[in-house]
Image (cartoon, grey):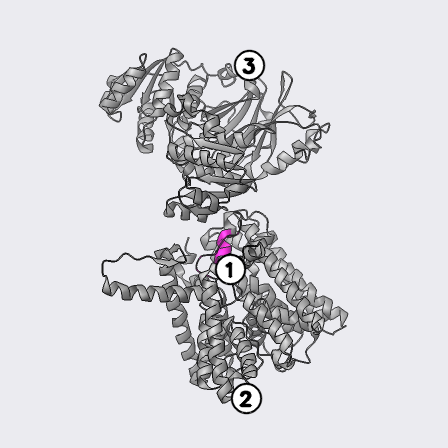
């Protein structure tokens, strides 16, 4: 497939990298030459210097033969114009990142007219993710739903008091059937075998049936977390949307923002949230607002450093669950090591959403793990696939690939080597990003 | 520096090089030559060392820019070394230095020879000697990029460190596809040329070996008297045409083959290249008409062959231009410095650099008149970035600097000034024959061993455009 991506920012590069590793022809348009050159040196794509909304530039990129256009510049307007232009050239699929909700509510600019097939709002997606994390019964770093919510994937950090520490996976007996599908250790994703031991500092990716999710705390011998009071630092778009969702759920929320005018605006739109005007990095203010008594703390200012420091402080003062937003992807591994419970990254969230859209059809759902090194995908097995009616251990899957769950009608199976896949099963697979093409081939049986 | 991935990639390079020895081996078997064993032995040694390197240094690390330089430079040094093995085992040369010189001269498509006499050697040895030019022409590293799976962005680092010219063009978004297309165009022209020569009466072996000398702008031939041995204007014209093609940018050829002929005649470098060649032919032919030949046609025939041969840095010979008058010789000497186009198989400084340097010099003049003027350098309607200009100025300085130092060394070793300078210009520019003692009817065999080492290094520096090789001797490059 030939794909044009406009904007070589963080999201643009992440998507370009994933797509080019899957043998798509990617052309990246960027208007800043320094950024373009750094993208050219790090990615196997063609880069073009220019404005992505300019018809000439798009023609130079060969828009007539393009199958998909992804507009992820920092400007909503440029993204929209680029998609409109692409519509004129007959590009089948157009994706735009649009952050400003005002554009999305106006019906006059309907998607058909603009020619946008998918709009992505990273901030709203991130806010939803934060709420999901806050609502989980134990302290987890990431949570995702698969198979229409029947299966949940979560990421768990192994601390010293983890009940199964230093045990081999095959010898652990959990109270409910769960599967440790992947581990993140020393900055690498491992797809573990039965002999692998769980050690302190690992991050485990665990699959569990939805019914058991709320009882997760029992597996780990912990009391359930009960979120009643949440404090949000930063009146950014993510902060406001998180507060709005939390308010609907009836959770007491305080939002701290430094800018007075911004506070007044937020207060108008969020009647049920307590808005505090003040410097959120000031300990005295946090203490007087009762940081010691809250259950959840969310740091979503525009500064990674502030988010990091204040969330560490909150953890230190006894907050049960601390979530920080970080824009720079390289910070993520360090952050989780030093004690922040969960890190959200709008860039990975956006890239996941776009990839999910691109692969829709065969693949239903997709999540990027860590820096996009590994993926979790959900797909329906084609009746022509060679893998069906064979025990899994003879399926010849690429190394480092694991089938995490099989969903057959309403039944969820956590499979073993002797289980057999049937046609039309939904399966959830953990794999390294570089193997995705091979896996798609195995499961679709050469179907176009 | 990630040593593992460097050694791993070098391993696959050597493995493929070993496999390519199959072609001369077939010739040796066909003619039942006694050098069969030499080829089998070289093939086993090369492929096995490649395989072991690949096997014992498994690595999937990404290739960064440092690794890219290291793989390209070391790859060429090793390829020339292993490529010399058949000559060594067959006893073609008295010493390893001679064998290495000849091998490097082949791979870098220089065409400077130390083999006397050429005729009488086994066919398979002559075939290998010419075939390595063809491998080196479009580039062994580019070949590796085209063959190896999934180098990803690392492929670009490798590609950049070998493809000549300031900023390599990409034909396709994926570098592997670009490398494949370039080799495809190269193979297409190669087949065409062999067909042309064969159907106008050359034997298949001669047609093949001369194509191996032409398309990579190499210059080795299996004949003592080079192309002059045939004294056949038809062959000469075919070879002129293909030398001219080989000296131009292959991405332009690809576009032209896809029906975009305009891009060829819109390209400033191609116009400059054609202009320089046309002007030189006319200038030399005029002088030759008055001093050497009685007919303007004879003058044109030899002038055009020699000018195209030298300007594209091929180095085929149909006339002893060393006895031509001084003006003609000096034009040829200057052509040795200008060379081919970016993205071609030709060597030397390249037309685009010369063109841009001239534009820059002109800009400095204008700055004297309008000190406040902001005038970017343009090529066609595109502005050339200051970064590229800086790179070109630096390259030009280094090229001249290396030329001067090496010329000094050659004079210390006893060569006269003209021969010394011509020998360096001809090897650094990957031309082959020079003037004087290393002139068109002479060889490099008489040069002392130290001189051969210096010239071998010049060939490598010229082919990889200096930076890629010189960076290896900077200590900072190797530090972690």
Residue B162, magenta (yes or no): yes
Q: Which residues are magenta?
A: B156-171
Q: Which chain's residue wears label 3?
A: A
Q: Is residue B307 above or below residue A67?
A: below
Per the model, the C-alpha gap separating discs 3 and 2 is 101 Å
Please, what secondary structure does the residue beneath circle 1 have?
helix
Residue A53, picture quadrant = top left
Q: Residue at x 42, y 84 (%)?
A: B417
Q: Nearer the viewer, residue A180 or B460?
A: B460
Residue B36 appears left or right of B311: right
* Label 3 crowd (10 A; few <14 / some 14-19 / many >=20): few
Where residue A15 is drawn, which disc sits there?
none
Q: Residue at x 45, y 36 (%)?
A: A85
Where residue B264 is drawn, which disc sits there?
1
Q: Is residue A118 above or below residue A14?
A: above
Q: Position of residue B280 (x, y in %)?
A: 47, 76
Disc number lying in front (1 or 3) = 1
Q: Which chain's residue wears label 2?
A: B
Residue A91 appears left or right of A260: right
Q: Nearer the viewer, residue B195 or A146?
A: B195
Q: What residue would you read off at disc 3?
A: A211
Q: What residue would you read off at disc 2?
A: B294
Q: Which chain's residue wears label 1?
A: B
Residue B83, picture quadrant = bottom right
């Amino acid at each position: 497939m030939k794909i044009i991506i406009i904007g070589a920012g963080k999201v643009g590069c992440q998507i370009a990298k994933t797509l080019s590793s899957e043998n798509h022809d990617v052309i990246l348009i960027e208007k800043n030459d320094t950024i373009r050159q750094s993208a050219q040196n790090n990615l196997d794509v063609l880069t073009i210097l220019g404005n992505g909304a300019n018809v000439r530039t798009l023609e130079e990129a060969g828009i007539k033969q393009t199958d998909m256009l992804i507009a992820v510049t920092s400007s909503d307007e440029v993204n929209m114009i680029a998609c409109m232009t692409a519509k004129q050239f007959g590009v089948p699929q157009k994706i735009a990142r649009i952050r400003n909700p005002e554009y999305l509510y106006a019906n006059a600019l309907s998607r058909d007219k603009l020619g946008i097939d998918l709009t992505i709002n990273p901030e709203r997606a991130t806010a939803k993710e934060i709420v999901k994390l806050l609502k989980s019964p134990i302290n987890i770093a990431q949570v995702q739903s698969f198979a229409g919510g029947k299966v949940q994937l979560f990421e768990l950090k192994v601390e010293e008091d983890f009940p199964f520490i230093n045990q081999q996976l095959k010898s652990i007996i959990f109270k409910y059937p769960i599967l440790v599908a992947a581990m993140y250790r020393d900055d690498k994703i491992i797809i573990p075998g039965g002999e692998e031991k769980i050690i302190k500092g690992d991050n485990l990716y665990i699959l569990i049936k939805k019914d058991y999710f709320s009882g997760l705390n029992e597996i780990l011998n912990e009391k359930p977390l009960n979120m009643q009071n949440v404090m949000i630092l930063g009146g950014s778009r993510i902060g406001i949307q998180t507060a709005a969702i939390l308010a609907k759920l009836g959770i007491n929320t305080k939002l701290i923002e430094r800018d007075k005018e911004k506070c007044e605006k937020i207060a108008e739109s969020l009647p049920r949230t307590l808005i505090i005007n003040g410097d959120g990095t000031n300990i005295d203010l946090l203490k007087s607002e009762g940081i010691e008594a809250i259950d959840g703390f969310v740091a979503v200012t525009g500064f990674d450093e502030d988010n990091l420091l204040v969330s560490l402080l909150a953890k230190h003062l006894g907050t049960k669950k601390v979530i920080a937003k970080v824009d720079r992807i390289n910070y993520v591994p360090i952050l989780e090591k030093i004690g922040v419970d969960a890190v959200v990254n709008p860039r990975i969230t956006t890239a996941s959403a776009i990839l999910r859209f691109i692969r829709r059809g065969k693949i239903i759902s997709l999540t990027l793990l860590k820096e996009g090194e590994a993926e979790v995908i959900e797909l329906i097995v084609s009746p022509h696939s060679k893998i069906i009616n064979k025990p899994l251990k003879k399926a010849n899957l690429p190394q480092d690939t694991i089938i995490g769950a099989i969903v057959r009608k309403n039944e969820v199976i956590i499979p073993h080597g002797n289980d057999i896949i049937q046609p039309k099963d939904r399966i959830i697979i953990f794999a390294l990003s570089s193997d995705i093409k091979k896996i798609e081939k195995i499961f679709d049986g050469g179907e176009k | 520096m990630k040593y593992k991935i460097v050694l791993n990639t070098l391993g696959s390079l050597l493995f493929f090089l070993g496999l390519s020895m199959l072609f001369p081996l077939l010739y040796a078997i066909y003619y039942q030559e006694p050098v069969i064993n030499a080829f089998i032995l070289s093939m086993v040694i090369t492929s096995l060392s490649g395989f072991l390197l690949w096997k014992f240094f498994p690595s999937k690390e990404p290739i960064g820019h440092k690794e890219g330089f290291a793989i390209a430079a070391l790859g060429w040094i090793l390829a020339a070394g292993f490529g010399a093995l058949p000559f060594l085992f067959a006893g073609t040369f008295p010493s390893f230095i001679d064998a290495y010189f000849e091998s490097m001269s082949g791979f870098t498509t220089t065409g400077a020879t130390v083999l006397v006499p050429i005729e009488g050697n086994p066919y398979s040895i002559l075939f290998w000697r010419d075939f390595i030019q063809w491998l080196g022409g479009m580039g062994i590293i580019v070949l590796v990029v085209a063959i190896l799976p999934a180098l990803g962005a690392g492929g670009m680092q490798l590609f950049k460190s070998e493809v000549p010219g300031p900023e390599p063009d990409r034909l396709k978004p994926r570098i592997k596809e670009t490398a494949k297309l370039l080799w495809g165009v190269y193979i297409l022209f190669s087949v065409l040329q062999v067909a042309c020569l064969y159907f106008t009466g050359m034997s298949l072996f001669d047609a093949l070996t001369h194509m191996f000398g032409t398309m990579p702008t190499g210059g080795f031939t299996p004949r003592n008297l080079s192309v002059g041995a045939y004294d056949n204007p038809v062959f000469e014209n075919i070879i002129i045409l293909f030398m001219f093609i080989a000296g131009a940018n292959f991405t332009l050829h690809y576009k032209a083959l896809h029906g975009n002929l305009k891009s060829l005649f819109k390209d400033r470098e191609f116009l400059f290249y054609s202009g320089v060649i046309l002007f030189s032919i006319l200038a030399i032919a005029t002088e030759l008409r008055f001093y050497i030949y009685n007919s303007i046609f004879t003058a044109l025939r030899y002038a055009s062959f020699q000018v195209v041969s030298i300007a594209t840095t091929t180095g085929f010979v149909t006339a002893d231009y060393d006895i031509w008058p001084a003006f003609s010789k000096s034009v040829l000497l200057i052509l040795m410095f200008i060379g081919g186009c970016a993205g071609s198989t030709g060597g030397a400084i390249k037309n685009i650099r010369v063109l841009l340097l001239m534009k820059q010099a002109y800009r400095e003049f204008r700055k004297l008149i309008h000190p406040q003027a902001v005038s970017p350098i343009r090529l066609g309607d595109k502005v050339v970035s200051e970064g590229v200009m800086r790179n070109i100025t630096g390259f030009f300085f280094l090229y001249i600097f290396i030329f001067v130092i090496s010329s000094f060394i050659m004079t210390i070793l006893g060569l006269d000034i003209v021969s010394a300078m011509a020998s360096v210009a001809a090897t650094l520019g990957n031309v082959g024959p020079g003037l004087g003692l290393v002139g068109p009817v002479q060889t490099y065999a008489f040069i002392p061993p130290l001189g051969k080492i210096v010239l071998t290094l010049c060939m490598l520096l010229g082919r990889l455009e200096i930076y890629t090789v010189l960076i290896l001797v900077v200590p900072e490059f190797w530090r972690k």
